[in-house]
Image (spheres, rainbow, N blue to C red):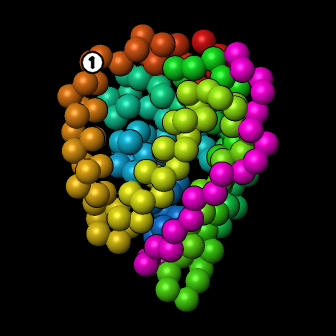
Amino acid sequence: MNDQTNDSKQIYRVVINAPIERVWSELVNTTSPRPFFYNAVCDTEGLSPGAPYRMVSKDHKNAFIVGEVLAFEPPHLFSQTFKFTTTDDVPCTVTYKLKEVSDGVEFLLETENVPAGTKTEKSMAEGGKWITTNFKAYMETGKVSFGARMMLAVMSLMGGMMPKATKIENWPRGKYQN
């Protein structure tokens, strides 16, 4: 397990042309796959501080991310610990902030304490950009970018090839290490 963290914050920001209530509702949806979150479903018993959650495949056979809600202040702030199930890295923190601005809603995705020099660090950097771009596209057009749709289609075809470490039975809610 890599305990050395990157203490700096990584910030991904975009303005979304949509009402804050709609943006918030989509961000915290726990009932259906979220295309801007790689078609994962947020599986939790509630989004309140201390509640465990996991991001799972739409068939609920694999868990990709596990964590705990740190803060939940509708419709402006959602913060959580975040750990990929495919690594031994320590959890980092992901925070989403929404703020009304003149041309819509400023959406901010912030990552902190990402284990330095790890797969988690690389994935978080790529994922932060991907999520921000595709969340905006989804909110404004009803779908993610063409490239994202193609990637999601390929991921869907490869669903049966997921690493055994991601099997849902290995990750009951609240479990952070395999």
Q: Is residue 167 above or below residue 28?
A: above
The percent coordinates of residue 114 (x first, y second) are: 69, 37
Q: Amino acid at mark 1?
A: Gly
| Residue at figure coordinates x 76%, y 48% from the top left | 8
Crowd tier of the residue under label 1, counting other residues whose Cα lies within 10 Å: few below 14, some 14–19, many 20 or above: few
Q: Is residue 11 magenta?
A: yes
| Magenta region, residue range | 1-19
Q: Is 5 placed left or right of 122 in the picture?
A: right
| Residue at figure coordinates x 35%, y 62% from the top left | 138
| Quadrant of the frame with the N terminus | top right
Q: Nearer the viewer, residue 115 or 15?
A: 115
Q: Is residue 108 above or below residue 174?
A: below
| Quadrant of the frame with the C terminus | top right
| Residue at figure coordinates x 65%, y 29% from the top left | 117
The percent coordinates of residue 69 (x first, y second) are: 68, 43
Q: Nearer the viewer, residue 161 or 22?
A: 161
Q: Is residue 30 above or below residue 12?
A: above
The percent coordinates of residue 157 (x first, y second) are: 20, 28
Q: Is residue 142 visible?
A: yes
Residue that extends furthest to the front in the rendered view of this protein: 117
Q: Is residue 95 magenta?
A: no
Q: What residue is shown with label 1?
A: 160
Element at label 1: helix
The percent coordinates of residue 31 (x first, y second) are: 41, 46
| Residue at figure coordinates x 29%, y 69% from the top left | 141
Q: Is residue 52 visible?
A: no
Residue 119 falls in image quadrant: top right
Circle count? 1
